[in-house]
Image (tube, rainbow, N blue to C red):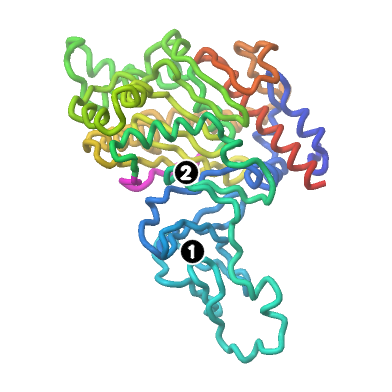
């Protein structure tokens, strides 16, 4: 079996111009290297500031194998701490969220810390007099993530000490978050309705690339769209559709529709699918809401926001955003063949409740483990994970619409069925992996 550790050249060879090697999905060694050199060195989505509205509120999350805490401070700021007592390493909290009060208290030996991680107190204080505790790391309090960016309440973290700035890493794709937040006339979103979680027995890259796969809906989701079409058969085209029909029927729109929706790729693996239109473009209009948007943003900006409804915007490697409906998916890799997918819905301040209902409805219909759509995808993801272990062909094809002129281009606009969007992700993967390995050598 090929060893990849300390061999960035072997990592680079796994990603060719128009195909990738199956080890990217199967190898536990590569997964471990990804934790070290990809997820620690890039900007990864941690959570939304609305999840911690009050001082002492926290959300526990793991990124790149490191347990973290997103914590609201007394002054209103959001900090990210490592969830590890400075004494013996005990996790300070094991709940996924809650309120710790005015300080953190370790459940093992009762060491306490301020909300910003500064040391507060230790039992048997006299026992540490004359020791080196205060001079070493254990006496300095909790470790703090130094590279945190709160962008319009979306909280991202880069764990590595060096690397690209937040703005340089994401660049133009940040407009997708702006579009989503600005759908609130007040410019504010809050998480609502809890979260739908699904553990899929496949590699995380398989799920993330499928977000940009517009060819599969006609075959993979044929049963869901045929069922919806049968239920809606006989209704005049002018009849207002129930929300579920409005959201499911476009999945069967055909290859030409998905091809013409268009797409754009950016440096570092990011992309926007549906730059011309998408399956979300024809939701029922809401005149009062649109008037409120014009009053808040002006005629031109309001039109730009409301007319732009991309299919998916990928913030590589961890986040997919839908501006309308206002929903996100977060990809949390667990092992080489296990991925946690979270689907979150948002309320837009100053907007009608219908917008939030659309987000909740879409997540239930499409991303819930029990949905009529997700079970098709999950079955095939897990089938691919097994099928890649077969003998013979060791490569995964990404040839569709490959053009040698795309090589070296950081930003390109293309057709919606082009596998360039996937090739772009893997090129970013190889670049980050090689750079991280070389820097660590």
Residue at horizontal 82 percent and vertical 39 percent from the top: 7
Between marks 1 and 2, how big is the CA–CA gap?
Answer: 27 Å
Q: Which residue is drawn at the image coordinates 60% and 19% (left, top)?
A: 420
Per the image, the residue denoted by label 1 is 94
Could you tell me residue 75's position as x and y percent?
42, 62
Q: Who's the residue at 23% across and 22% down the image?
A: 284
Which badge, 1 or 2, comes first in the chain's sequence?
A: 1
Quadrant in which residue 108 is drawn:
bottom right
Please tell me whether residue 418 belongs to the stretch shown in magenta: no
The percent position of residue 142, horizontal first and vertical second, equals: 58, 67
Front-most of residues 6 and 384: 6
- Tell me if residue 344 comes above or below residue 117 in the rendering: above
Q: Which residues are magenta?
A: 190-200
State whether the magenta stretch is mostly helix, strand or loop.
strand
Look at the image and tell me whether residue 224 can be seen: no
Is residue 407 positioned above or below 128 on the image?
above
Q: Residues within 10 Å of mark 1 (few under 14, many from 20)?
A: few
Q: Taking 295 as reference, is 250 above or below it?
A: above
Left or right: 231 as drawn, with respect to 250: left
> Residue beneath label 2, please?
151
- Residue 128, quarter of picture: bottom right
38 lies above or below 299: below
Query: Mark 2 falls on what kind of element?
Result: strand
64 left or right of 238 in image: right
Q: Classify the position of the N terminus by image quarter.
A: top right
Toward the bottom, the furthest residue is 126
Front position among marks 1 and 2: 2
Percent across and percent down for residue 72 are 43, 60
Measuring from the top left, give residue 396's x and y in whole percent: 66, 22
Decide which of 171, 426 is in the foreground and name it. 171
Tell me if 7 is positioned left or right of 189 in this view.
right
């Amino acid at each position: 079996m090929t060893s990849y550790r300390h061999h960035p050249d072997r990592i680079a060879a796994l990603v060719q111009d128009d195909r990738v090697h199956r080890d990217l999905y199967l190898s536990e060694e590569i997964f471990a290297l990804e934790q070290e050199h990809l997820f620690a060195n890039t900007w990864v989505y941690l959570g939304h500031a609305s999840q911690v509205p009050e001082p002492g509120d926290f959300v526990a999350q793991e990124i790149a194998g490191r347990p973290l805490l997103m914590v609201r401070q007394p002054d209103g700021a959001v900090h990210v701490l490592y969830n590890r007592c400075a004494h013996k390493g005990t996790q300070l909290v094991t709940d996924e969220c809650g309120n710790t009060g005015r300080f953190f208290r370790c459940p093992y030996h009762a060491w306490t810390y301020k909300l910003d991680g500064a040391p507060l107190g230790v039992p048997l204080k006299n026992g540490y007099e004359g020791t080196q505790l205060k001079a070493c790391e254990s006496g300095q309090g909790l470790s703090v993530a130094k590279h945190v960016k709160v962008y319009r309440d979306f909280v991202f973290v880069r764990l590595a000490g060096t690397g690209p700035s937040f703005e340089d890493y994401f660049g133009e794709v940040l407009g997708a978050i702006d579009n989503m937040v600005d759908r609130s006339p007040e410019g504010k979103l809050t998480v609502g309705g809890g979260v739908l979680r699904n553990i899929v027995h496949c590699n995380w890259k398989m799920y993330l690339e499928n977000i940009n796969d517009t060819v599969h809906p006609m075959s993979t989701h044929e049963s869901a769209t045929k069922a919806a079409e049968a239920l809606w058969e006989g209704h005049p085209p002018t009849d207002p559709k129930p929300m579920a029909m409005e959201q499911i029927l476009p999945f069967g729109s055909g290859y030409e529709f998905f091809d013409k929706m268009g797409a754009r790729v950016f440096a570092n693996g990011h992309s926007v699918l549906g730059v011309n239109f998408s399956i979300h473009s024809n939701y029922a209009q809401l005149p009062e809401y649109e008037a409120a948007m014009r009053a808040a943003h002006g005629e031109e900006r309001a039109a730009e926001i409301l007319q732009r409804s991309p299919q998916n915007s990928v913030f590589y490697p961890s986040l997919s955003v839908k501006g309308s409906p206002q929903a996100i998916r977060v990809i949390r890799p667990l092992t080489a063949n296990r991925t946690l997918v979270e689907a979150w819905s948002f309320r837009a301040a100053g907007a009608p409740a219908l917008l939030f209902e659309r987000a909740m409805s879409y997540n239930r219909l499409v991303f819930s483990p029990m949905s009529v759509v997700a079970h098709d995808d999950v079955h095939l993801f897990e089938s691919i994970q097994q099928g890649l272990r077969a003998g013979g062909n060791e490569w995964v094809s990404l040839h569709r619409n490959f053009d040698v002129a795309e090589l070296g281009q950081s930003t390109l606009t293309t057709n919606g069925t082009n596998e360039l969007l996937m090739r772009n992700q893997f090129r970013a993967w190889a670049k980050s992996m090689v750079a991280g390995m070389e820097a660590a050598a």
